Amino acid sequence: MSFISYIIQRTLELELEKNNIEYSHEKIREAIKKMEYSEIRLKDKLFALRANLNDFQKPY
């Protein structure tokens, strides 16, 4: 695991704990793996699209 990955995972874990939500390291990693990120440029503007894929959503 890279240092940046560790920092992201630990930050998520602390934020979840602050909100009384308990997640294991494994669950956090699985949730991150299921995230999809895309960038689209239209007329010199950059748009970031983020989606959380689950078992019912499949990319076309």
Image: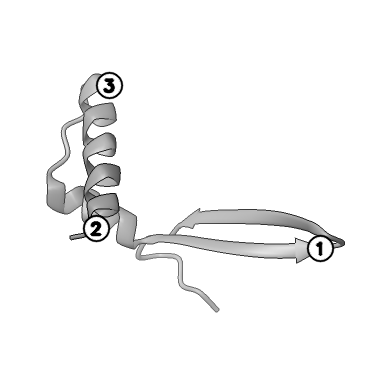
**Residue 59 sits above or below residue 46 on the image:** below
Q: Left or right: 49 with respect to 9?
A: right
| Left or right: 59 as drawn, with respect to 5 | right
Residue identified by numbered label 2? 30
Quarter the C terminus occupies: bottom right
Furthest toward the right, the residue is: 43
Count the labels in the image: 3
In terms of secondary structure, where does tag 2 sit?
helix
What's the residue type where badge 1 is placed?
Answer: Leu
Q: Which residue is mark 1?
A: 42
Residue on which disc 3 sits: 19
- Pair 1/2: label in front: 1
In the image, taking residue 2 as reference, residue 35 lies left or right, namely right
Q: Which mark is residue 50?
A: none
Q: Position of residue 36 (x, y in %)?
A: 46, 62
**For residue 36, side relative to residue 41 (left or right):** left
Residue drawn at the location 24% of the way across and 58% of the way down = 30
